[in-house]
Image (cartoon, helix red, strand yellow):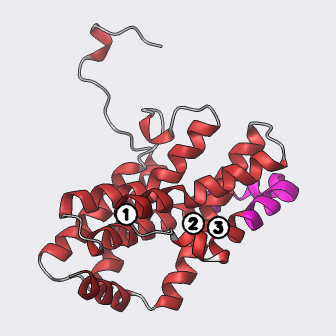
């Protein structure tokens, strides 16, 4: 089963294309981590650590859970060096990077869509059921951001009501992926559609400030903080 599913996954994206897309997503995620480190007044080591954790944390968690060891981040030097390049860029040019934050957010949304689909497919390849594959697809997409916020002593963004939807678009993309797997229609076209759906939902959430609802009737019983 594993060998067959891996071949299916490889048919979706050629290894070279998958590797290039991974590096682009890693680079953009790393920039978001490095920018938070600058805002927190971290030194150069802290900037590098937050960039690495943000970029690679979700994939590392997924690979360890499914037993894909050693994780790709430790076997491909490009995966390790790309966040350092992003950290170096932000270290010297962070005022300019801040000014193109909107563009960075767009690429971040694209990385979210790509990683939720690729993470879900890889989890299924290694024998997880459909529900667990969705969970790990979500973890692949948002896990690095959660670790970034925890290390920076912040409440993770995906848990805050005052932040635009982030986890929900990734969950939608991951769910579409497993449905395609379940009905045996996972193709380059349908996997791209799942990634684009997550991407567009994230863009719409940022544009219209869509947020998840809080507890029903909470103001009657819970004091505002």
Instruction: Determine whether the residue tagged by mark 1 lies in a helix, strand or loop.
Output: helix
Give the percent coordinates (x, y) of residue 218: 29, 16
Residue depicted at x 35% and y 87%: 12
User: Callout 1: few (<14), some (14-19), or many (20+) C-alpha neighbours within 10 Å?
Assistant: many
Does the CB distance between marks 1 and 2 fall below 8 Å? no
Q: In the rendered image, which quarter is residue 195 located in?
A: bottom left
Q: Position of residue 126 (x, y in %)?
A: 29, 72
* Residue 101 visible in the picture: no
When the figure is inspected, residue 77 is found, relative to residue 151, above or below; the finding is below
Q: CA distance from mark 1 to mark 2?
A: 12 Å
Span highlighted in magenta in the image = 84-104
Which disc, if any, is residue 198? 1
Q: Which residue is mark 3?
A: 27
Q: Which residue is mark 2?
A: 107
Q: Residue at x 32, y 28 (%)?
A: 214
Q: Residues within 10 Å of mark 3 (few under 14, many from 20)?
A: many
Point out residue 172 in the picture as x, y percentages from the top left corner: 29, 59
- Callouts 1 and 3 close, C-beta under 8 Å: no
Left or right, residue 77 beside residue 216:
right
Asked if one can make out residue 82 in the rendered structure from this viewpoint, the answer is yes
Q: Main secondary structure of the magenta part?
A: helix
């Amino acid at each position: 089963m594993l060998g067959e599913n891996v071949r299916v996954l490889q048919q979706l994206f050629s290894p070279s294309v998958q590797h290039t897309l991974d590096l682009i997503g890693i680079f953009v995620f790393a920039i978001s981590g490095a920018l938070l480190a600058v805002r927190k007044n971290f030194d150069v080591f802290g900037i590098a650590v937050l960039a690495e954790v943000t970029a690679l944390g979700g994939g590392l968690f997924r690979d360890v859970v499914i037993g894909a060891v050693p994780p790709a981040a430790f076997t491909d030097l490009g995966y390790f060096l790309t966040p350092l390049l992003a950290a170096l860029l932000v270290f010297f040019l962070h005022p300019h990077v801040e000014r193109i934050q909107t563009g960075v957010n767009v690429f971040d949304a694209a990385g979210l869509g790509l990683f939720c689909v690729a993470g879900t497919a890889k989890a299924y390849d290694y024998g997880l059921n459909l529900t667990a594959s969705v969970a790990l697809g979500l973890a692949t997409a948002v896990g690095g951001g959660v670790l970034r916020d925890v290390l920076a002593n912040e409440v993770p963004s995906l848990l805050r009501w005052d932040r635009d939807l982030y986890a929900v678009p990734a969950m939608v993309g991951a769910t579409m992926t497993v449905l395609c797997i379940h009905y045996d229609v996972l193709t380059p076209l349908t996997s791209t559609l799942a990634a684009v759906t997550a991407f567009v939902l994230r863009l719409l959430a940022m544009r219209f400030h869509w947020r998840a609802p809080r507890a029903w009737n909470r103001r009657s019983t819970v004091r505002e903080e």
